[in-house]
Image (cartoon, grey):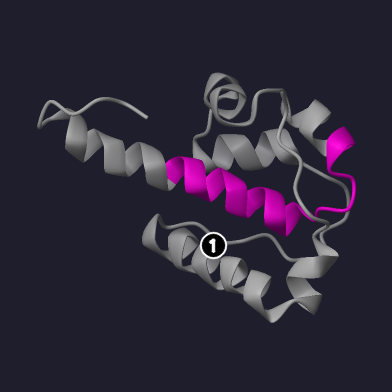
Amino acid sequence: MCSQYPPANQLRENPRQSLDLNYWRELAAKHGHRMPRSDTKGWPARKLMRRYGVTLAEFRAVHGCTPTKWRELNPNWSLTGFAGLLLEIVENRSENRGLESEGAEKW
């Protein structure tokens, strides 16, 4: 089942959810990436996935569907929100690399 989330405009309207945006910005800086602007035209999901190094298999493992299907189910989400979710995948991957060397299970 593909993940569905609250509309992205709630990120701007709800101060609690805007904390995610700050967290995503921290992740972007930590991993040497920039967040796309909220007014980016189009929806270059594949380009963003390549830039962040997230494979289709990783995206499917986390969200249960392709980015296209995810976009259909979450039409109100901005590219900035999508980038944040990709950065969470990158962060989880980097955290698990350290754990794998200690023999821990993958997520």
Where's residue 19, x and y in %? 58, 73
> Position of 53 compared to 7: left or right?
left
Where's residue 102, x and y in %? 9, 32
Residue 40 found in image quarter: bottom right
Residue 71 found in image quarter: top right
Q: Secondary structure at mark 1?
A: helix
Q: Which residues are magenta?
A: 72-90
Front-most of residues 81 and 38: 81
Where's residue 13, x and y in %? 80, 77
Does 57 appear above or below 98? Answer: above
Residue displayed at 65% across by 24% down:
64
Residue 3 found in image quarter: top right
**Residue identifier under label 1:** 24
Please say whether residue 62 is one of the residues in the magenta stretch: no
Magenta-colored segment: predominant secondary structure: helix
Does 39 appear above or below 107? Answer: below
Please say whether residue 85 is one of the residues in the magenta stretch: yes
Front-most of residues 59 and 43: 59
Where's residue 74, x and y in %? 84, 43
Residue displayed at 56% across by 42% down:
51
Residue 26 visible in the picture: yes
